[in-house]
C-alpha cells in the first residue's frame, strides 16, 4: 500500500509538516478559547463531552446547560431576555464551522508526521505507516460526519436518535485513529534507526 502523501518530494516533506503542524497548533489554541465557556457541569470537557454524549438525553442536557448561561447572564429583573443566545451556544456553533478548516490541516500534519517516521525505518514499519497515513484522512472524514450530527442537534434542534449515537461513534473512532497515528509517529521518531 502506498502512503497518501508519498508523491510529495522528500525535500518538501519536512517544511510542509512543520507548516501544517503550526497551523494545527494555532487552530488548536483557537479551540481552547472557544471551548472555555462550553465547560459546564453537564459538559465538564466542553465540546468533547457533547461529541461523546451518545444519547439524546445527555446531548439535550448539554445543550440546555449552554442555553442556561444566557438566562443567567441576560436576565432583567430575574426574567430571561427573549431571543438571547448564550455565548456558549454561539461558540459551539462557531467552533463547528471552524472545525471544517481544522480537519484537513490536522489530518495532513499527522499524515506527514507518519510518513516522515515511516520513511526513517522502511520495511513493515513503512507499510504500517502507509495504512495509518490513510487513517489520518479517515479520521478527518469521521470528524465531518460527527460535525454533521452535532450541527443537526445544535442548529435544527433534532436532538434524537441517531444523531447523538452517530456523533459519539464517529468521535470515538476519530480519536482512536488520531491517537494511533500520533503514537506511531512518536515511536518512529524516538526509535533509533538501524545502521
Image (cartoon, rainbow, N blue to C red):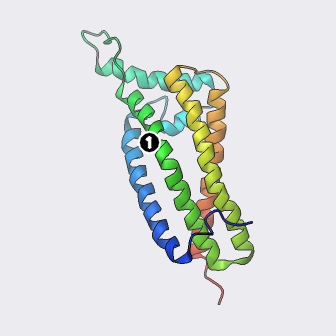
Q: Nearer the viewer, residue 172 or 39?
A: 172
Identify the residue at horizontal 43%, vertical 50% (top origin).
28
Identify the residue at horizontal 32%, vertical 19% (top origin).
72
Whether residue 117 can be seen here: yes
Decide if residue 155 is on the left or right side of residue 176. left
Identify the residue at horizontal 66%, vertical 33% (top origin).
166
Q: Is residue 64 above or below residue 22?
A: above
Q: Which residue is mark 1?
A: 98
Q: Is residue 20 above or below residue 92?
A: below
**Secondary structure under the numbered disc 1 in the rendered image:** helix
Q: Nearer the viewer, residue 82 or 45?
A: 82
Residue that extends furthest to the bottom in the rendered view of this protein = 195
Identify the residue at horizontal 41%, vertical 50% (top origin).
27
Mark 1, Cα crowd under 10 Å, few <14 / some 14-19 / many 20+, is some
Quadrant into which the C terminus falls: bottom right
Whether residue 39 can be seen here: no
Q: Position of residue 189 (x, y in %)?
A: 57, 74
Q: Is residue 116 above or below residue 70?
A: below
Quadrant into which the N terminus falls: bottom right
The image quarter containing residue 59 is top right
Q: Nearer the viewer, residue 14 or 67?
A: 14
Amino acid at each position: 500500500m502506498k502512503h497518501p502523501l508519498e508523491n510529495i518530494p522528500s525535500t518538501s516533506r519536512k517544511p510542509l509538516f512543520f507548516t501544517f503542524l503550526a497551523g494545527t497548533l494555532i487552530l488548536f489554541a483557537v479551540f481552547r478559547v472557544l471551548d472555555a465557556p462550553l465547560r459546564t457541569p453537564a459538559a465538564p470537557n466542553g465540546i468533547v463531552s457533547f461529541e461523546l454524549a451518545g444519547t439524546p438525553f445527555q446531548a439535550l442536557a448539554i445543550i440546555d446547560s449552554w442555553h442556561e448561561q444566557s438566562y443567567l447572564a441576560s436576565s432583567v429583573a430575574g426574567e430571561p431576555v427573549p431571543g438571547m443566545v448564550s455565548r456558549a451556544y454561539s461558540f459551539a456553533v462557531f467552533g463547528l464551522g471552524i472545525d471544517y478548516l481544522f480537519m484537513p490541516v490536522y489530518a495532513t500534519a499527522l499524515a506527514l508526521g507518519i510518513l516522515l517516521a515511516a520513511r526513517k525505518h522502511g520495511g513493515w514499519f513503512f507499510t504500517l505507516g502507509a495504512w495509518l497515513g490513510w487513517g489520518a484522512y479517515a479520521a478527518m472524514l469521521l470528524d465531518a460526519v460527527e460535525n454533521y450530527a452535532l450541527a443537526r442537534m445544535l442548529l435544527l434542534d433534532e436532538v434524537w436518535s441517531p444523531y447523538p449515537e452517530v456523533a459519539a461513534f464517529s468521535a470515538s473512532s476519530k480519536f482512536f485513529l488520531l491517537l494511533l497515528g500520533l503514537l506511531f509517529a512518536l515511536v518512529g521518531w524516538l526509535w533509533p534507526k538501524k545502521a
